[in-house]
Structure formats: structure tokens, C-alpha cells
């Protein structure tokens, strides 16, 4: 088969569409014929040499896919290997393609659905009537979080460049903040503060995120685009009776992923099938053009997911 390989850490040019050995299914695994995968920020970090796959996982990038299992359409959460023609998947990490969603579009659902649900719903316990602040609203994570927050009855505030505001308002965001010209703390506090903050920035936003919290607010950090280390003023956090959680999805034990997938199937998939959440697809590119897809994501040109599609 062919897959996207990384011959050395570096820029998008190190991604190569190459012949590689076929995967083999281990105990409890199945082989999926990949129709499409989707680009995630973690794939860019892996390409740069900063986020290696967990031991025993495929060395190829790609944390989600959609495809065929014995002719039946499925999508899957992966630890790696989605940028390929075939991938071995634990059987309990599969999801059905939601009714009304095209097979290739389903490739953009598992990673964002599992990440947002596990952090915003299960972890931060977002409740109806609360306010959710989503940083990076135009990303795949952001566009999904906006829709899930609204479907759960929350008020949603998000940040994005001005050119993307109209699209995010159309997804259901109540307020969109231009982070380049506006102070998200001032705007959020003017609206009563955030009960939950979904944060992809980390260090450089830590103090400001605490300032933006409402009393008893919860920060769920899932990315470190603004750095890994910062000084924490515990008095400020304690004054808000606030809390901070920080997680990644890829490195969780298989059993935890299985539980998350079961929760997503039970609570999120019906919202997708009812049309209350939809996959937001920015563009589709051939799998062999993974380098171009990475450039799009690195330059923040997209709204939603960038898909990589195998030739039919």
C-alpha cells in the first residue's frame, strides 16, 4: 500500500507519498480501507518531531479516518496511520458514519468529537445556560465546539480573525472576538465571564484565561500553541474558585478511549443525525498532497477541517 511517510523532522516538504508494508491487524483489531483522513495540529507536531506516536502505533500521521470495513462505511479514532490506504484499528475505536453525513466528511469527526466531548462535557461539565469560551473558533476543534456548546444550551463566545466571524456566527456562536484588535478578557467579562474555557493556547493565555473566568469557572487546556510553561498565580485562581485541567487524547490508554467513544456515540452522534451539528469541511485534497494540506493549516487559512482523500 501507499502512505504518507516522514523521512526526517521538518517542514511540509518532508511528507512523502511512498510504498510501505501493509498493516496487519493485531488482537482485537480490524483493517479499514481508508477513504479519507483529516489534518489535525498534532499531525504538524509529529512532522516537526515534537509529538511521536505512542509505542506500538503506526508511524504514519493521521489521528482519524473514514473508510470501509468489509464493505460497510465506518469512521475511526486512531493513534496514527490515517494518512494511508489501509490502517489497523481496535474494533472498539470504530464509529458508524452518522446518517446524513458523506463518507469522506465523516473522516473529520472522530478526533474533534472525542476531544471536545471528553474535555468540555465530561471533564469541564458544561451545563445548559452556562457560557463557553472557545479559543480558535475557526479550527476543526473550534467549529465543532461551537456547535456542541449551542446544542447543549450554552451561550458560546469564540475568538477568530475578523474575516472568519460571519462563518462562525452562522455556526451558532453568540459572540465572536477579533483577538488581533479586541481584548477577549474585557469582552468575556462584559458578558458575565466564562463558565468553561476550551483553550488551545496554554502558557501565553494562562493569566488572561483566569481573568476571563466566571466564579467556579473551569479551564480545559488541550493545546500549547502559546507555549508550555507559565507562572500561575494561585490567588487569582482561588479567588474565582476556578480549576484547570490539561489533557491530550492520543496518549490515553485504549480503555479510556473506548469509554470516550461510547459516550460520543451515545450523546453526540444523535445530535449530528438530527442536523444540530455538522462536519465543517474547508477543502479536500488528494492524500498525496498532504504537504499542501499542512501548509493550509499552518497558515490558518481554513475554517473547519482539511480532508485528505484517497483515489477511488
Image (cartoon, rainbow, N blue to C red):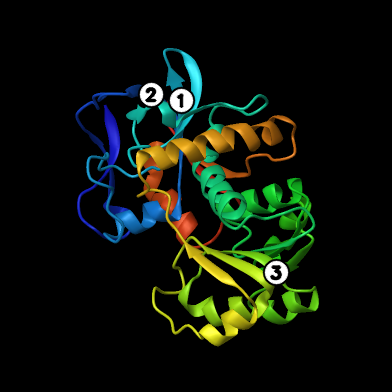
Quarter-of-image position of residue 142: bottom right
Residue topped by disc 1: 67
As drawn, 121 above or below 11: above
* Residue visible at 48% across and 71% down in the picture: 202
Q: Are marks 3 and 2 in contact (CB under 8 Å)?
A: no
Alpha carbon distance from label 3 to label 2 = 41 Å
* Residue visible at 44% across and 58% down in the picture: 247
Q: Are marks 1 and 2 in contact (CB under 8 Å)?
A: yes
Alpha carbon distance from label 1 to label 2 = 6 Å
Task: Describe the element under mark 2 as helix, strand or loop.
Answer: strand
As drawn, 139 above or below 277: below
Badge 1: residue crowd in 10 Å (few <14, some 14–19, many ≥20):
many
The answer to which of marks 3 and 2 sits earlier in the sequence is: 2
Task: Describe the element under mark 3 as helix, strand or loop.
Answer: strand
Residue 31 image offset from top left, x and y in percent: 34, 22
The answer to which of marks 1 and 3 sits earlier in the sequence is: 1
Closer to us: 97 or 241: 241
Mark yes or no: residue 172 visible.
yes
Residue 59 image offset from top left, x and y in percent: 25, 43
The numbered dot on residue 153 is: none
The answer to which of marks 1 and 2 sits earlier in the sequence is: 2
Left-right relation of 96 to 70? right
Residue topped by disc 3: 194
* Residue visible at 43% across and 81% down in the picture: 230
Residue 54 image offset from top left, x and y in percent: 27, 47
Amino acid at each position: 500500500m501507499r502512505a504518507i511517510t516522514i523521512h526526517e523532522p521538518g517542514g511540509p516538504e518532508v511528507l512523502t507519498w511512498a510504498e510501505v508494508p501493509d498493516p496487519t491487524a493485531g488482537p482485537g483489531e480490524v483493517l479499514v480501507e481508508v477513504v479519507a483522513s483529516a489534518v489535525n495540529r498534532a499531525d504538524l507536531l509529529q512532522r516537526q518531531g515534537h509529538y511521536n506516536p505512542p509505542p506500538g502505533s503506526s508511524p504514519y500521521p493521521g489521528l482519524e479516518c473514514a473508510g470501509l470495513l468489509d464493505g460497510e462505511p465506518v469512521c475511526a479514532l486512531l493513534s496514527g496511520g490515517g494518512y494511508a490506504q489501509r490502517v489497523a484499528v481496535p474494533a472498539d475505536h470504530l464509529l458508524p458514519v452518522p446518517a446524513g453525513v458523506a463518507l469522506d466528511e465523516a473522516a473529520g469527526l472522530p478526533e474533534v468529537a472525542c476531544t471536545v466531548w471528553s474535555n468540555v462535557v465530561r471533564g469541564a461539565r458544561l451545563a445548559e445556560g452556562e457560557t463557553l469560551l472557545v479559543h480558535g473558533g475557526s479550527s476543526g476543534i473550534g467549529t465543532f465546539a461551537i456547535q456542541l456548546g449551542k446544542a447543549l444550551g450554552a451561550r458560546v463566545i469564540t475568538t477568530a480573525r475578523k474575516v472568519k466571524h460571519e462563518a462562525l456566527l452562522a455556526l451558532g456562536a453568540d459572540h465572536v472576538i477579533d483577538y488581533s484588535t479586541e481584548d477577549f478578557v474585557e469582552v468575556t467579562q462584559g458578558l458575565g465571564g466564562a463558565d468553561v474555557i476550551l483553550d488551545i493556547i496554554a502558557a501565553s493565555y494562562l493569566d488572561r484565561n483566569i481573568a476571563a473566568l466566571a466564579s467556579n469557572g473551569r479551564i480545559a487546556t488541550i493545546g500549547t500553541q502559546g507555549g508550555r510553561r507559565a507562572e500561575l498565580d494561585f490567588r487569582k485562581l482561588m479567588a474565582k474558585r476556578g480549576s484547570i485541567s490539561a489533557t491530550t487524547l492520543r496518549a490515553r490508554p485504549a480503555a479510556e478511549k473506548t469509554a470516550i467513544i461510547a459516550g460520543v456515540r451515545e450523546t453526540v452522534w444523535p445530535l449530528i443525525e438530527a442536523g444540530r451539528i455538522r462536519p465543517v469541511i474547508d477543502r479536500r485534497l488528494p492524500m498525496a498532497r498532504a504537504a499542501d494540506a499542512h501548509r493550509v493549516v499552518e497558515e490558518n487559512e481554513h475554517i473547519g477541517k482539511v480532508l485528505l482523500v484517497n483515489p477511488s
